[in-house]
Image (spheres, rainbow, N blue to C red):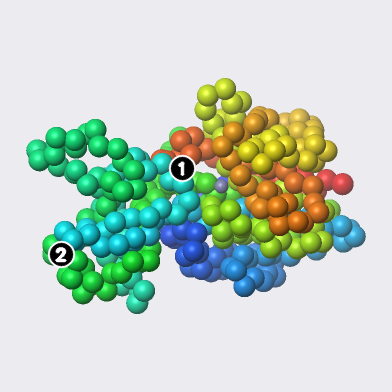
Amino acid sequence: MKYKFDMEYFKNVAKVIFTTDSPSGYTLNAIKKVMEFINELGYSYKLTNKGNLIVEIEGTNNDKTVATSAHIDTLGLMVRSINSDGTLKLTNIGGPILPTLDGEYCRILTRVGTIYTGTILSTSPAAHVFKDASSKERNIDNLCVRIDEKVSNKTEVLNLGIQSGDFVFIDPKFEITPSGFIKSRFIDDKASVCLILTVLKYFKDNNIKPTYRTLVYFVVHEEVGHGAASIDPNISEFVTVDMGCVGLDLNGDEFKVSIAAKDSGGPYDYELTSKLITLAKENGIAYAVDIFPFYGSDVGAALRAGVDLKGALIGSGVAASHGMERTHLEGIENTMGLLLCYLLSK
Ligand SMILES: [Zn+2]
């Protein structure tokens, strides 16, 4: 691939974005961080009522409007109720693989802004006490939060200011290894947020413009299904950047950009998807075309909302999605390359 992106910038942005909690419903802090990066790059933007951030970039030809997006909202947890033993009962936001949460550190945010630490545990957490410590199903009813405070009943927890509806942030455990792997929760879709910012920096660094007027959406309700439902009706093409699936018979991996031909919402636009495949081929970008079996995206949200556009989906392959995820900087670079080629294409 001929394009060289500022990967140090990507890594610096990633450190900030990955370590800012942003479950669906509590994304403003993360969006503010994105705004700071956008300000530094010198683009104009606006924030919608429901919290999406839109960056508008003038093209060399403004007769047509195209769009790209990534979602900064993530899976998460919320306090459902307080148990009589002073632990917290949970409800999940989106679909995390629940057994992977057993043993994770977390933070509880009260409505007045106090943060308490804790650990997500099974309700049979001790091997020396519970016969079913290993075998108990890790579903949402069998998980709880042990708060790191001297509490042993509901009243004491209420006195801390914790109540139903408080967000519980899961430790993302973000790391970039010397071998180039990104290990973290919520690579879906924070990696795409960071790679789009790096592509926007490429435009500025090289003093170039996209071919068409381009709207870049940083979306905040994708994991709950309606992220891009309120997208601008003037958009004719929408290439969303979200994670590629890895595993079983799929072709994608952590080093390639995946191009989705179909997900659970049906086939993506034939012409636009074919164009992306051709661009990848012509520009020496490592890619895989795949079917994503259990998957929905912001293109689906926009189409179901009635927007008349052609939609496609690309993204770096993410292993163990919705669990302890991993991807590689090579997959990120290939995704940046394909997004850039698309935005520069006619
Ligand atoms: Zn996603």
- Say which residue appears at 55% left-offset and 49% top-offset: 189
Check disc 2 and report its element: helix, strand or loop: loop
The kind of residue on which mark 2 rests is: Asn
316 vs 268, nearest the viewer: 268
Q: Which mark is residue 153?
A: 2
212 vs 245, nearest the viewer: 245
Badge 1 crowding class, 10 Å Cα cut-off, few under 14, some 14 to 19, many 20 or more, is some
Badge 2 crowding class, 10 Å Cα cut-off, few under 14, some 14 to 19, many 20 or more, is some
Distance between the Cα atoms at labels 1 and 2?
32 Å
Q: Which mark is residue 322?
A: 1
Mark 1 or 2 closer to N-term?
A: 2
324 vs 308, nearest the viewer: 308
Dot 1 beta carbon under 8 Å from ligand 1: no
Q: How many marks?
A: 2
Image quarter of the N terminus: top right
Tell me if 123 is positioned left or right of 141 in this view: left
Query: Closer to the camera: disc 1 or disc 2?
Result: 2
